[in-house]
Image (cartoon, rainbow, N blue to C red):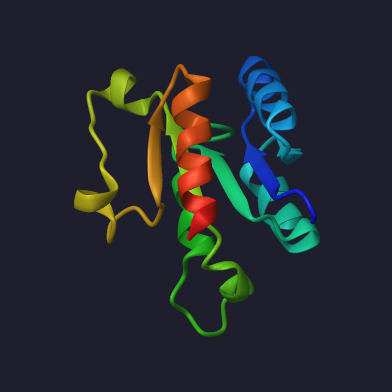
Amino acid sequence: MEKPKILLIDDDPDVVELIKIALEANGYQFYRAANGTEGLKMVKEIRPDLIILDVMMDTTTEGFQVSYQLRSKDPKSEYREFSQIPIIMMTGIAQKMQMKFAPEQDGDYLPVDEFLEKPVRVDPLLEKIRKLLKR
């Protein structure tokens, strides 16, 4: 059985290393993109089973833009076939800008499956990954 492929789209080398170690130790194939443009390209190339997406990269809202592209309802969207890939959005934006997000409340506004606050803790991340991959 092939290991699930997880794509991390994040520009923070410390976060990348932490998540890489945790995912590989738990039997996942790890892929990384440093920004949204590279991440969208990799989605087409590797067809991940799950995406972990940072919000603030090259711009403060880059992760939001990536999630909107991946979940576009436009039938002509080049990412239409990838719209069902689960997305976990990681962000420190809530602390920096005093904002709160919850998929139940913001599901229509922010098209992701789960939110995770930075700094990332490994156990809650792995729990969310297992839950989403079971769907």
In the displayed structure, 123 sits above or below 32; it is: above
In this view, which residue lies farthest toward the front?
A: 1
Residue 84 locus on image (x, y percent): 52, 67
In the rendered picture of this protein, how many numbered marks are placed on residues? 0
- Image point 56% across, 41% down: which residue? 52
Of the pair 25 and 33, the residue shown nearer to us: 25
Quadrant (top left, top right, bottom left, bottom right) of the N terminus: bottom right
In the displayed structure, 40 sits above or below 14; it is: below
- Image point 64% across, 74% down: which residue? 78
Asked if one can make out residue 56 in the rendered structure from this viewpoint, the answer is: no
Residue 93 locus on image (x, y percent): 36, 27
Q: Left or right: where does residue 98 sit relative to residue 37?
A: left
In the displayed structure, 44 sits above or below 119; it is: below
Residue 87 locus on image (x, y percent): 50, 50
Of the pair 21 and 25, the residue shown nearer to us: 25
In this view, which residue lies farthest toward the left?
A: 105
Q: Left or right: where does residue 133 sit relative to residue 38?
A: left
Asked if one can make out residue 19 in the rendered structure from this viewpoint, the answer is: yes
Where residue 26 sits, quadrant-wise, is top right
Of the pair 74 and 103, the residue shown nearer to us: 103
- Image point 47% across, 35% down: which residue? 127
In the displayed structure, 104 sits above or below 96; it is: below
- Image point 61% across, 75% down: which residue? 81
